Image (cartoon, rainbow, N blue to C red):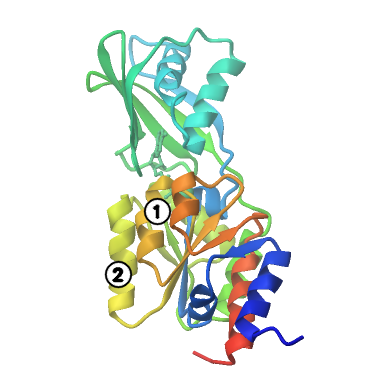
Amino acid sequence: STMPPLLASIANAGRHGVLVKSATVMETVGRTTVVAFDKTGTLTEGAPEVTEVGAAAGHTEDEVLALAAAVERYSEHPLGRAIARAAAERDLAVPEAVDFRALPGRGVTGRVGGRAVTVERADAASATTGTVVEVRREGEPVGTVTLVDRLRPDARAAVQAVAGLTTAPAMLLTGDHASAAAAVAERTGVTSVRSRLMPQDKVAVVEDLQSRGERVLLVGDGVNDAPALAAASTGVAMGRRGSDLALDTADVVIVRDELGAVANLVRLSRRARRYVI
Ligand code: ADP
Ligand code: MG
């Protein structure tokens, strides 16, 4: 074919379900020196399930779940959707909530019966590999909800594949707590892990690497990843369950949700440009 190599590789990526937004992106992606993965919804399926509900003294498990679901049913976060679904599955009477607000990278808040309710990342160190969120009313603990998300079947292979193409080891960046992050890191072979990151902390990690000459390719799905996707040399969004903000901000969208697309993209770009890092 007489198609210019960059354009041909964009067309090729498209046939594999990867949307590359510009020729510049296709060129930049080949220069990647380090790949950073978000955890929830990126290395994991992003379809968590509630596995445990804990009630503080004076409350029942059903109360905890119903109160959490009251606020979470307005959330687009996978954790929020799982909590709302769990309450529906148990046929709980979920009260009305008003003044809903998402706290990206942290949780959600709203008012139920005139009282402030938050569902947030539990602050206490946790031994569980699941994600523990804390339900509070007017600041008082009501209970906790534990959720477990499955690893994507291709997560480990995808991490190994990029490791062979970059100079620095693959990284895991997550808003979740350390033990949940460590469990996913161990199962995927990621050795460099940063946990409990707020959206701006993810940006700081990316900018710090880039100020030291690294070219970061970040893969993410959430609203909380959007600022870091914008800061990274290449931002890649998971398409199928990704948030609109991540899809808009990213340079590349993995439409078919196959993580192996990341390594393929780097290879395609290098083949088109014939450069080595
Ligand atoms: P990741 O960076 O792994 O994709 P997020 O940044 O989306 O994870 O979330 C980080 C943490 O913030 C979660 O592990 C959870 O504790 C908390 N969190 C985020 N969104 C919600 C929500 N809707 N309800 C409860 N907790 C949430
Ligand atoms: Mg995520």
Q: Residue at x 54, y 30 (%)?
A: 82
CB within 8 Å, label 1 to label 2: no
Pick the quarter of the image with the N terminus: bottom right
As drawn, is 129 to the left or to the right of 10? left
The residue that disc 1 covers is 226
Q: Residue at x 59, y 14 (%)?
A: 90
Total marks shown come to: 2
- Amino acid marked by disc 1: Ala
Q: Is residue 223 above or below residue 185?
A: above
Viewer-proximal residue, 2 or 176? 2
Of tags 1 and 2, the one toward the viewer is 1
Instruction: Tell me residue 120's x, y (percent).
Output: 34, 33
Viewer-proximal residue, 124 or 119? 119
Q: Is residue 175 visible?
A: no
Viewer-proximal residue, 182 or 22? 22
- Amino acid marked by disc 2: Glu
Residue 211 figure quarter: bottom left
Disc 1 element: helix
Instruction: Tell me residue 258's x, y (percent).
Output: 66, 59
Of pointers 1 and 2, the one earlier in the residue sequence = 2
Instruction: Tell me residue 173's x, y (percent).
Output: 41, 58
Mark number, residue 218: none
Viewer-proximal residue, 135 or 224? 224
Q: Is residue 170 above or below residue 270?
A: above
Residue lying farthest to the left in this orientation = 139
Q: Is residue 143 above or below residue 180?
A: above
The residue that disc 2 covers is 207
Q: Residue at x 39, y 22 (%)?
A: 71
Disc 2 element: helix
Residue 212 figure quarter: bottom left
Instruction: Tell me residue 170's x, y (percent).
Output: 49, 71
Residue lying farthest to the right in this orientation = 1
